[in-house]
Image (cartoon, helix red, strand yellow):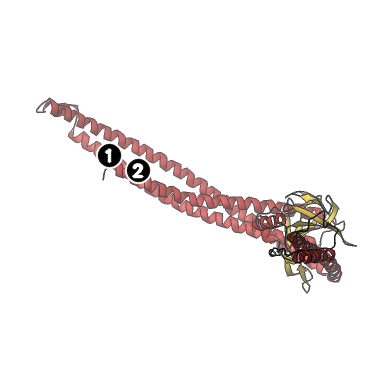
């Protein structure tokens, strides 16, 4: 094999080796990012609990927040476990490389020692001089001198290779020790997290036991909340039905006006926006009769507009909204989903099944609701006995932000993604600050969680 091919082979093997190293590093980076995110969410849960516990030790919102914190803690432990497994694999790989390097160094040293011993036994300065002087001619003497130089150079390279291998070995040993220390640190962190998890579970059980003594009061409160949620749902459906009806009426009007233009009626001259559909249809029939009397051809009607359709702008907005599923910003800057979409058993009153039309996001006192996407505010809903709800249109998608104490927008306002919409209400009784967030497509409720980034 030529030296060129040898270099190609070495480079090829090195590239595969680097690819192999990149994959674990990439996984470790992702796990590290996930670990930081989970810890940040746990810290947020702790701050929310501190705010609520200033008013009442045990509350349903506390139970929901701790439930979420327990899930986060379990995810954090699982992430630490996966990271530990990766480091264990790297330690095993590093140990294997160290064993190989150690064997190579021992072999090189042994070969070098044998070569030195042989050189001492068979050669000295006099013999080397005699070896050169006994040459047949000058050219052979030059070649023998070059040969002796090559032997000397070979010994020098062997010494350098031994030093290089020893440096490489020391670096791998240092890396191995660092990995072992990191593994021990991860194990210690896992032990701390598991201890915290156990304590939080015990505290949760005590809180639930305390709240179950008040189950009748909680059930009564749930019935009232269900009634308020139903009122909000009915109002949302009414507003959406009104929006659909407006679009339908607009499409019907567009069809009639197109027909009027087709037969030759001129907008602003023969009819106006205030001309009723019935009056405009009479004008169209009259114009058709005049054309037939004059033996004039009436153009064939074009395809009518749909009875319910979006404007080109609204269609574009709806398509853009749908294309951003799973990438939309949260409706709060920082928060935890404490109640998910759909039917679920109440954490305290176990006999009660709740049906959530959206998701409930716990956040810190003073937090603001913000738009998840650009759109237009179509209504600030006021339900007696409840806080405000803000409804934003995104084509034929609608986002609803409720439990708002103060609205910063009004109907007709255009809003952008992450724009503040209003201040989220903080309950004076238990200190909880929870945004109820809903997503609708036409008159169908959707689970908002899969649409938000990072959920």
Residue 377: x, y in percent? 80, 54
Instruction: Name the quadrant containing residue 158.
Output: top left
Find numbered disc 2 in the image and state the secondary structure of the residue it sits on: helix
Check disc 1 and report the residue beneath it. Answer: 113
Along the line of sight, the residue nearer the viewer: 135 or 2: 2
User: In what quadrant of the picture does the N terminus appear?
Assistant: top left
Q: Is residue 20 left or right of residue 283?
A: left
Task: Give the quarter of the figure containing the C terminus.
Answer: bottom right
The residue where tag 2 is placed is 105
Residue at 45% of width from left, 44% of height from top? Answer: 173
Residue 117: x %, y % from top left: 23, 37
Residue 261 at x, y = what percent?
75, 59
First in residue order: circle 1 vs circle 2: 2
Residue 169, given in percent of the width and then of the height, sits at 41, 43
**Could you give the CA–CA distance between mark 1 and mark 2, rounded to whole angstroms?**
12 Å
* Camera-side residue of 169 and 277: 277
Tag 1: Cα neighbours inside 10 Å, few (<14), some, or many (≥20)? few
Q: Nearer the viewer, residue 279 or 71?
A: 279
């Amino acid at each position: 094999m030529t030296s060129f091919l040898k270099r190609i082979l070495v480079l090829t093997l090195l590239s595969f080796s680097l690819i192999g190293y990149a994959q674990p590093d990439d996984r470790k980076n992702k796990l590290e990012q996930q670990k930081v995110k989970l810890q940040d969410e746990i810290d947020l849960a702790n701050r929310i609990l501190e705010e609520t516990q200033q008013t009442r030790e045990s509350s349903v919102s506390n139970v929901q927040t701790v439930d979420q914190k327990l899930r986060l803690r379990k995810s954090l432990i699982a992430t630490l476990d996966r990271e530990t497994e990766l480091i264990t694999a790297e330690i095993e790989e590093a140990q294997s490389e160290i064993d190989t390097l150690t064997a190579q160094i021992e072999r090189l040293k042994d070969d070098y020692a044998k070569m030195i011993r042989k050189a001492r036994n068979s050669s000295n300065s006099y013999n080397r001089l005699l070896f050169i002087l006994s040459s047949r001619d000058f050219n052979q003497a030059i070649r023998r001198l070059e040969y002796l130089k090559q032997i000397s150079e070979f010994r020098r390279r062997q010494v350098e290779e031994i030093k290089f291998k020893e440096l490489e070995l020391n670096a791998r040993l240092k890396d191995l020790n660092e990995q072992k220390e990191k593994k021990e640190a991860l194990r210690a962190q896992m032990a701390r997290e598991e201890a915290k998890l156990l304590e939080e579970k015990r505290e949760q059980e005590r809180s639930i036991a305390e709240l179950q003594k008040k189950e009748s009061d909680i059930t009564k409160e749930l019935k009232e909340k269900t009634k308020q949620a139903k009122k909000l749902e009915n109002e949302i459906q009414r507003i959406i039905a009104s929006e659909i009806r407006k679009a339908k009426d607009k499409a019907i009007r567009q069809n009639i006006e197109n027909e009027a233009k087709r037969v030759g009626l001129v907008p602003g001259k023969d009819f106006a926006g205030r001309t009723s559909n019935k009056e405009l249809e009479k004008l169209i029939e009259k114009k058709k009769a005049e054309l037939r009397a004059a033996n004039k051809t009436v153009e064939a009607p074009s395809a009518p507009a749909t009875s319910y359709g979006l404007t080109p702008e609204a269609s574009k907005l709806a398509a853009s909204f749908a294309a951003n599923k799973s990438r939309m910003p949260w409706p709060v800057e920082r928060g935890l989903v404490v109640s998910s979409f759909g039917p679920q058993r109440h954490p305290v009153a176990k006999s009660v099944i709740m049906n959530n039309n959206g998701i409930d996001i716990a956040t810190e006192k003073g937090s603001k609701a913000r738009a998840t996407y650009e759109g237009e505010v179509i209504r600030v809903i006021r339900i007696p006995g409840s806080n405000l709800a803000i409804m934003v249109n995104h084509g034929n998608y609608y986002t609803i932000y409720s439990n708002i104490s103060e609205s910063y927008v009004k109907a007709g306002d255009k809003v952008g993604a992450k724009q503040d919409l209003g201040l989220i209400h903080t309950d004076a009784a238990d200190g909880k600050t929870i945004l109820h967030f809903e997503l609708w497509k036409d008159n169908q409720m959707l689970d908002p969680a899969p649409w938000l980034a990072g959920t």
